[in-house]
Amino acid sequence: MDQIVRTPHQMGSALRRIRRQRGLSQGELAARAHLRQATISEFEAGKGSTRLDTIIAIMVALDLEMVVRPRTTSAPEDIGKAY
Amino acid sequence: MDQIVRTPHQMGSALRRIRRQRGLSQGELAARAHLRQATISEFEAGKGSTRLDTIIAIMVALDLEMVVRPRTTSAPEDIGKAY
DNA sequence: ACTGAATATGCTGTTAGGCGTATAAAACTG
DNA sequence: CAGTTTTATACGCCTAACAGCATATTCAGT
């Protein structure tokens, strides 16, 4: 249930999944976070240039928090990358 | 050791602490992440408008990852630790 | 298929991020 | 305390985020 995030795309996907779990539309989330529905759409699509405060606003609206930690080696996509 | 991040300021502080643990200067980190030393300085100071891809670049250079999870309620004595 | 909701895309305007470059202010070190 | 390293600020430039507003497109329910 905790989502590992290493790329903008993973960030967008993770929050989209959680938003849907909460039963919210992009428009509803946007209203709660004081953002445009279009901004949510672009962010969830993996826009890397989304600003930190925008992401924070979304996380607050979804009642989430982030944890920063040393990189783990458990992600499936990483296997093979070193070779 | 894992850093809870709920605000831009906490994000900057957390990565600054980790950078120092790694024994890196802002200039060295900037070089590794292909950013300016000034950009690192501003980000660590808590700039909320820092872009996601900039943050990701810093985390990659520090060998870190993020986790997104439901907000937890930390004990009062823990709250100060994030600062 | 029809229809309304949800999501993606477009346009303009304002504001500001990050760049290169340079320097000022702090913080170590001998 | 001087000399060095590190961190914080500044200016001009280019690009784009996000705003409001509107519409096109896709999805889901009946």
Image: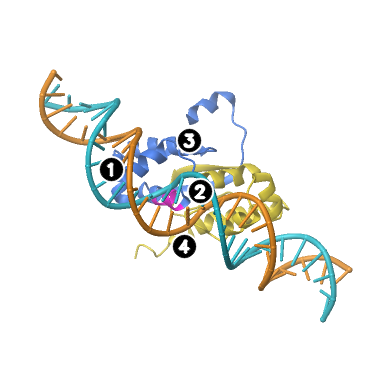
Chain colours: A yellow, B blue, C cyan, D orange
Question: Position of B14 compared to B75: left or right?
Answer: left
* Residues beneath discs 2 and 1 located on the same chain: no
Whether residues under marks 4 and 3 lie with C-beta atoms below 8 angstroms apart, the answer is no
Point out residue C25 in the picture as x, y percentages from the top left corner: 29, 27
What residue does disc 1 label? Answer: B27
- The reply to whether the C-beta atoms of the residues labelled 2 and 4 are less than 8 Å apart is no
User: What's the amino acid at mark 3?
Assistant: His
Q: CA distance from mark 2 to mark 4?
A: 26 Å
- Please check whether the numbered discs 2 and 4 fall on a single chain: yes
* Residues packed near mark 3 inside 10 Å, few (<14), some (14 to 19) or many (20 plus): some
Q: Which of the two discs, 2 and 4, sits closer to the camera?
A: 2
Query: Which residue matches tag 2?
Result: A51
Residue placed under numbered mark 3 in the picture: B9
- Residue type at mark 1 is Gly
Q: Is residue A62 visible?
A: no
User: Which amino acid, by three-letter code, is at mark 2?
Assistant: Arg
